[in-house]
């Protein structure tokens, strides 16, 4: 009885060790994800996200910074998840900035049109 | 024996529990949120027009999240997929909005171009009408086109011999000029006095200047700004005809009004 329990215990310890070992060796440094996240942030910046979506852009940048810390402590799985999130956060920040700029352009051109229309009316 | 039964019972119970889990529809707030975001845009034509990459990524991540949820996978993995699905759907939605706005910009730009063309046509028409009206006004005053611009020649009807005060008939002529200048606010004039060659040249010079000044003063008294009127006395210079005959001398005694271009520039002799 006692022997049986200790054997089970040994087996589970072995199993867990295998599992942990397996995970650590199968997950590589998320180099590609880091690059994708960084270039997504760059693109967002060139879409003027600093001006239009500073909070979301900042969140993406913080996630990349956190991920870099996790990579240093070889927590690649968690780092990878953060980097995936940072990429889509930055892409959304960029997309929202582009929408905001397009909205501004629409308003500008409409006020141009209104001014032209009024000038035409005055002339007639 | 008793113990074994208990173990068996537990095993059965456990498996029932697991089956129950697998068959009951699983629910997770993050996945629900992602599904709602995806459902909202999956049939949006503007999203479709702006490219389907984000939409496809949203769909893939969503179905990953849903199947992991059904399989009872690690909640962190499920929520990660849901997070990505939600974000991709949001990005697709933004791109759709942008495509719609771009379409608005394009049609607004076309409208602006049309208006600008119309404006230019109107301006040209207005300039043509103004030139026409100006020509008519000038004709009324008998101005003639010279290489110095439009010149209005007022004969010796303005002044009596050797006098520099406007006669009543002269005042009427100047009033017409003042009317014209009030209408064409950008135009300036130069009043030039000329005499015949009878008498001293220096006297004639002074007389021509006084006469030009008299015309200017009359214009100013009619409300024309003095900055719009230059004066010049030329005395006996630039005769229009011979000074040897009475008729020729009469032509030479005159005041010429040179009218500026529309920017106020006047060519001098």
Image (cartoon, rainbow, N blue to C red):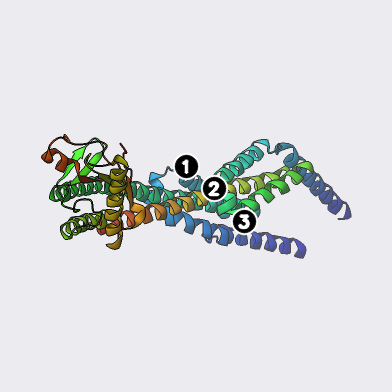
Using a 10 Å C-alpha cutoff, classify the residue at mark 1 as few (fewer than 14 neighbours), some (14 to 19) or many (20 or more). Answer: few
* Extreme residue toward the right, this view: A2
From the viewer's perspective, tell me whether residue B173 is left or right of residue B1.
left
Residue for point 63% across, 58% down: B15
Residue for point 78% across, 47% down: A16
Q: Are marks 1 and 2 in contact (CB under 8 Å)?
A: no
Q: Chain of mark 2?
A: A
Name the residue carrying label 1: B53
* Image location (x, y in percent) of residue B18: 61, 58
Could one spot residue A25 in this view of the protein?
Answer: yes
Q: Chain of mark 1?
A: B
**Mark 3 or mark 2, earlier in chain:** 3
What is the distance, in whole Å, between disc 1 and disc 3 at their CAs? 25 Å
For the residues carrying marks 1 and 3, which lies nearer the camera in this image?
3
Residue for point 19% across, 58% down: B167
Where residue A76 sits, quadrant-wise, is: top right
Using a 10 Å C-alpha cutoff, classify the residue at mark 2 as few (fewer than 14 neighbours), some (14 to 19) or many (20 or more). Answer: many
Q: Which mark is residue A55?
A: 3
Label 2: state its secondary structure: helix
What is the distance, in whole Å, between disc 1 and disc 2 at their CAs? 16 Å
In-front residue for pair A121/B17: A121
Label 1: state its secondary structure: helix
Q: Which mark is residue A94?
A: 2
* Image location (x, y in percent) of residue A51: 57, 52
From the viewer's perspective, tell me whether residue B143 is left or right of residue B89.
left
* Image location (x, y in percent) of residue A32: 64, 36
In-front residue for pair B257/B53: B257
């Amino acid at each position: 009885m006692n022997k049986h329990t200790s054997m089970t215990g040994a087996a589970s310890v072995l199993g867990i060790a295998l599992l942990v070992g397996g995970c650590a060796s199968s997950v590589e440094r998320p180099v590609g994800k880091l690059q994708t996240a960084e270039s997504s942030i760059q693109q967002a910046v060139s879409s003027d996200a600093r001006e239009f979506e500073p909070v979301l852009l900042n969140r993406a940048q913080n996630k990349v910074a956190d991920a870099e810390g996790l990579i240093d402590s070889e927590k690649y799985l968690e780092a990878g998840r953060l980097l995936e999130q940072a990429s889509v956060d930055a892409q959304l920040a960029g997309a929202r900035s582009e929408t905001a700029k397009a909205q501004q352009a629409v308003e500008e051109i409409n006020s141009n049109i209104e001014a032209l229309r009024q000038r035409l009316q005055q002339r007639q | 024996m008793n113990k074994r039964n208990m173990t068996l019972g537990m095993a059965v119970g456990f498996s029932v529990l697991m089956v129950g889990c697998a068959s009951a529809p699983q629910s997770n707030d993050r996945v629900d949120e992602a599904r709602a975001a995806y459902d909202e845009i999956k049939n949006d034509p503007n999203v479709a027009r702006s490219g389907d990459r984000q939409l496809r990524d949203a769909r893939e991540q969503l179905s990953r999240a849903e199947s992991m949820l059904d399989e009872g996978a690690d909640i962190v993995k499920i929520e990660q997929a849901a997070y990505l699905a939600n974000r991709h759907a949001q990005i697709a939605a933004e791109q759709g909005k942008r495509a719609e706005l771009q379409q608005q910009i394009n049609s607004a730009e076309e409208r602006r171009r049309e208006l600008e063309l119309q404006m230019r046509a109107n301006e040209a028409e207005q300039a043509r009408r103004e030139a026409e009206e100006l020509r008519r006004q000038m004709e009324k005053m008998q101005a003639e086109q010279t290489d110095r611009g439009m010149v209005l020649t007022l004969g010796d009807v303005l002044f009596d011999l050797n006098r520099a005060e406007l006669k009543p008939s002269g005042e009427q002529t100047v009033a017409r000029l003042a009317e014209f200048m009030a209408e064409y606010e950008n135009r300036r004039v130069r009043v030039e006095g000329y005499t015949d060659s009878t008498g001293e040249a220096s006297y004639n010079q002074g007389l021509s200047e006084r006469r030009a000044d008299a015309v200017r003063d009359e214009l100013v008294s009619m409300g024309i700004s003095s900055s719009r009127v230059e004066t010049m006395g030329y005395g006996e210079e630039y005769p229009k005809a011979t000074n040897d005959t009475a008729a020729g001398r009469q032509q030479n005694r005159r005041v010429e009004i040179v009218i500026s271009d529309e920017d106020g520039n006047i060519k001098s002799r």
